[in-house]
Amino acid sequence: MARLLLFDIDGTLLDTGGAGGASLLDAVEDVLGVSRNTFPPLNLAGATDGGILRQIFSHAGRELDALTQEAYLASYLQHLHRRLHASDFPGVTLPGVLDLLPALAAAGGADLGLLTGNVRRGAELKLARFDLTHHFLEGAFGDDAVDRNLLGPFAMERMSRATGRCYVASEVIVIGDTPKDIACAHAIGARCLAVGTGQFATDQLQPHQPWQCLPDLADTARVCDLLLS
Ligand SMILES: [Mg+2]
């Protein structure tokens, strides 16, 4: 059976150590002229960048017009690149990720893609920082929809085009760290492997009824077995 594995990025593959959130606020100051200190905490977990932008512009009392949005994203990406490559960058890959991705490739039988709320360029910057880009063929991104539940079909269609294979929902597994990842898997009738490496512990993820829930991806053999069998 073909298998399509769609990975979330933040809290699942890697943790930017706050660099992502800080870059969003850098752009608030640069483009919207509003001090980060006046901003309430942003709800980032599982959100798409489009959804985060709506929060930000609403807090700033600004209309989300296309030009300002474009300027905002350009500034965000510039700051993100700078922060990801700063000498004191605190980011890490999450437990097991650096072993799991090559192990899945070596085992064969699964196609790896992305299902992330990051805009495509932001996703590329974060993955490239840890040399993870080559593991993923295609994906769905925050550019595609504000509502994460709408991202699944974009990922399946792009992956189909990249591999020449057609996937049905029963062959798709979403790997993510928030209730929103679980919901977006359910939205396409797919399974979700939830991991407690983001802001939610496994006992907070379980009530959202993921197919499987693990504290992290550290047990390579077990995770491969779950994802490939
Ligand atoms: Mg996440």
Image (cartoon, grey):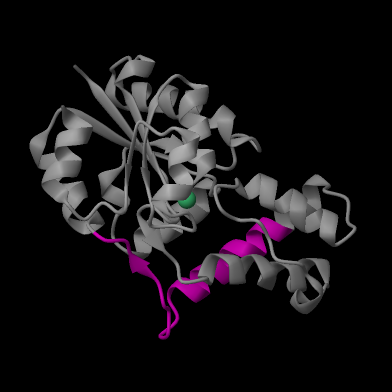
Q: Which residues are magenta?
A: 72-95
Height in image: 224 above or below 196?
above
Which quarter of the figure has residue 20? bottom right
Residue 16 spot, x, y in % from top left: 45, 67
Tell me if I can see residue 78 in this picture.
Answer: yes
Height in image: 151 above or below 103?
above
Q: Nearer the viewer, residue 159 or 51?
A: 51
Tell me if I can see residue 167 in this picture.
Answer: no
In the picture, the quarter occupied by the C terminus is top left
Which quarter of the figure has residue 206? top left
- Side of 115 relative to 104 (left or right): right
Height in image: 177 above or below 86?
above
Height in image: 82 above or below 65?
below
- Side of 90 relative to 59 (left or right): left
Residue 35 spot, x, y in % from top left: 80, 77
Residue at (59, 41) in percent of width and height: 143
Q: Nearer the viewer, residue 219 or 59?
A: 219
Residue 115 spot, x, y in % from top left: 44, 38
In the picture, the quarter occupied by the N terminus is top left
Q: How many marks?
A: 0
Find out whether residue 69 is within the magenta segment. no
Residue at (46, 29) in percent of width and height: 185
Find out whether residue 81 is within the magenta segment. yes
Residue 89 spot, x, y in % from top left: 43, 79
Residue at (43, 56) in percent of width and height: 11
